[in-house]
Amino acid sequence: MPIKATSDSQKKRNREAADWLLRNSDPNQSPTERAHFEKWLARDPENCRTYSAAERLLGDASRVIEADPALKNIKVKPQNRTKPVSLTLAALAIATGLFFALDGPIRLQADVIAGTDEMPLVTLEDGSEVQLNASSAIAVDFTEKRRNIRLLRGQAFFQVAPVADRPFTVMAGLTRVTALGTAFDVRYGDADTEVTVTEHSVQVEFDAQGVNPVYVNKDQQVAYHYEKQERVISPIDGNLALAWRRGQIALDNAPLSYVIEEMNRHLKGKIVVADSALANRRVSGTIKIADTDSALAFVTTALGVRVTHIGPLIVISR
């Protein structure tokens, strides 16, 4: 599936459109702000097109409300009779929340988004290949002099086509990875960012004071921990590290929080752990991560925990 990059100017326009969409939802918006919006629309025909796309995304959220009786029939009781709460405003607030829940901001920035049941393999315009893990997203920015990718969420494996005068760089939060003719994996997690190299080497830089750049070679992994603001390099089996591409993850004394984060990629609902002590319990083994029932059974057996289903929510407790 070949894709074409979105320019920096279009990404900026997407962010502005999302911002204006939410500001225009305010019933108390001032005439001055509305005039600024009209000027923004008139400045470039593309602004109007992009804003319309943002409105369609918000419309998707509104249709979710219409399709769900629990949301459609919401009753809002005023707490103060002098300031009644408008059902329209309540519905708008829900729609705005769903705009974010339905990936509105991500969809306006991303060139490729993977669903919970997808791990798409895409070919970039330079011939490089990228495979996204489930629930992951990337934005592509290629020019004549550089090839930049932003990993907006999740995990991706990159097989880079060598182009000597066009560096290939992946940004994941505060971590910048520059390929040196190579294949590598980037996981942008809740607690850390991991870069695993399976061919040649990469240079990894961190936008954090006192954390020096590092070169990572084949069968090595560097993990940058956000809270500690430190990096750790370790040897790794590249085949095991990329088991996610086969619908599995190989665990070696990994915290339960890590396992749950990976399981949530493949789940339309959400799994939560009841307390932090339980989230830090360790587990080892190989899990079919795309099979939620199998993965939950593994965790239950390994840690002796209890699993409770509450609608789309799954709670793991002692």
Image (cartoon, rainbow, N blue to C red):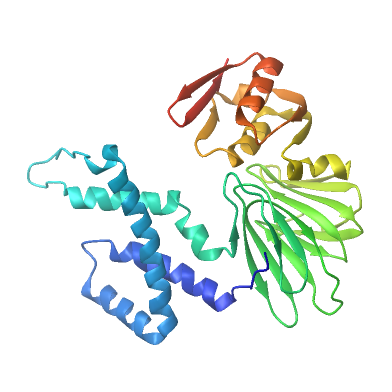
Residue 147 vertical placement versus 129 (above, below): below
Residue 308 image point, x, y percent: 50, 20
Please give the count of numbered marks on the rendered protein.
0
Q: Is residue 226 left or right of residue 163?
A: left
Residue lying furthest front in this view?
A: 1
Quarter in which the N terminus is drawn: bottom right
Residue 32 image point, x, y percent: 25, 76
Residue 258 is drawn in which quadrant? top right
Q: Residue at x 42, y 78 (%)?
A: 47
Quarter in which the C terminus is drawn: top right
Residue 57 vertical placement versus 278 (above, below): below
Q: Is residue 5 left or right of residue 210?
A: left
Q: Looking at the image, can residue 293 be seen?
A: yes
Residue 133 image point, x, y percent: 67, 48
Give whichever of 100, 177 is nearer the camera: 100
Residue 203 image point, x, y percent: 84, 61
Residue 108 vertical placement versus 218 (above, below): below
Q: Residue at x 57, y 49 (%)?
A: 115
Q: Looking at the image, can residue 211 be seen?
A: no
Residue 68 vertical placement versus 49 (above, below): above
Q: Residue at x 83, y 64 (%)?
A: 179
Q: Residue at x 72, y 74 (%)?
A: 125
Q: Is residue 299 left or right of residue 33?
A: right
